[in-house]
Image (spheres, helix red, strand yellow):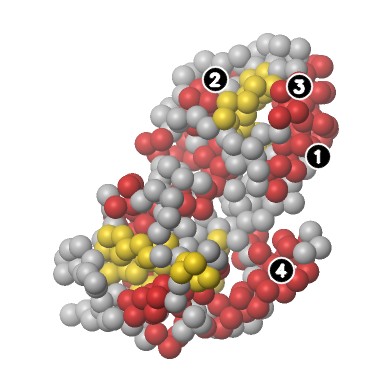
Amino acid sequence: MDTDPPDAARARGSVLWLSNETPDRDGQGGQRRQYFQIRALVRAGWSVHVMTLAGDQDDTTLREIATVERFAPFLHKRLPHPTRYFLARRRARSGRYDQVIVAHLESWALLRGAGRRLGVPVLVDVHNVMSPWLSRYGRTREAATFRQIEDRVLRDASAVSVCSPAELDRLPDGGTAQRIVAPHGIDESEWPRPPAAAPPPVVGMFGNWSWTPNTAGIAWFAKDVWPRVREAVPDAEWHVAGNGTPARFAEIEGFRALGRVPALSDLTAVSRVVGVPVRAGVGAPVKFGEALATGRPVIATTDGASAHPGSPARVTNDTDEWVAWLVERLGPDPALADDEGRRTYRWAMDELPWERTTAPIVAWLSENSTRSRP
């Protein structure tokens, strides 16, 4: 049954949001990106109707800000349910929506390549450009498949958005789609100003450690960085939040696995510095922007920091520089960490609220609305 988006008559416009995963404030990075982008659109005056697959992912927080329609992904086992494609295209062509936003390349299939034939502007939030990353790992067949999809989206969509300037450079040439950078942001309410005095010498990290770039990064840190830091600062500790930390890390001196924590600010409140060790990453991790919001000094690899090249974080891939930076800030005088943390926090609060980082998409909506104006 078709339903009108809430307050459509009073809104600046109506957006149909298509996604293979469910936007969720409390979900993983991609789910959080979608949730906060949708919230930014709603706060800017658009009504949003989300179509997403049915399943275990929670839509509670999403229903607080948008209408939600979920549809069965499969008929039997892994056989795709044909109605999901029919319903998505039917909604897009219904005339009820001023624009369509497709979240992730994997969701592009929901439109069955209709693209410009829908009669409504379509923006695809590519998020990560997958083909160069897959090629880097020698996964040539998968890389070729994603390259075909990327080429098709650049040809058939009205616009594409990516999460960093680095990802913009990785987009293939060709196509007529407008290219937009919409970086990851932060929810200021999740990051209260930390206490002025720096805590004991703890290195804090958070993320999904089963994701290949994170797995490679934390393994590098454990092998090449942490032993040297611990040797120089014997009372230093390394606290890691999130799922997927290797079981063998339990034997590392000073290491503590926290698992999934209720609030990341609880971790960073007891951390003097925050590290983002992403190696051979794809896209830009949501957690880098959140690390900047902790009010603690941040050190990151180049791939970890790609979303915000102008940030005050220390960005380097050099092992010696990681060690020296950490040892200096974990030493007996916390004043350096205090000063850097305050500057980092101010920068994050000014530059990274989701309303600011989503502004390029909001501008695109305004420029490409099909709603008639007086």
Which residue in the protein does label 3 denote?
Answer: 252
Q: Nearer the viewer, mark 2 or mark 4?
A: 4
Q: Are marks 1 and 2 in contact (CB under 8 Å)?
A: no
Q: Is residue 107 visible?
A: no
Sequence-earlier tag: 1 or 2: 2
Give the x, y percent position of residue 167: 63, 62
Q: Quadrant location of the N terminus?
A: bottom left
Q: Residue furthest front?
A: 76
Left or right position of 57 against 316: left
Q: CA distance from mark 1 to mark 2?
A: 26 Å
Neighbours of disc 2 within 10 Å: few (<14), some (14-19), many (20+): some
Q: Are marks 3 and 2 in contact (CB under 8 Å)?
A: no
Above or below — where is 144 with respect to 50? below
Mark 1: amino acid: Asp
| Residue toward you, 242 or 267 | 242
Which residue in the protein does label 4 denote?
Answer: 142
Q: Nearer the viewer, mark 1 or mark 4?
A: 4
Question: Which SS class for mark 3?
Answer: loop
Q: CA distance from mark 1 to mark 4?
A: 30 Å
Which residue in the protein does label 2 denote?
Answer: 270
Which residue in the protein does label 1 denote?
Answer: 318
Sequence-earlier tag: 4 or 3: 4
Residue appearing at x 65%, y 13% in the figure:
333
Mark 2: amino acid: Val
Q: Quadrant location of the C terminus?
A: bottom left
Mark 3: amino acid: Ile
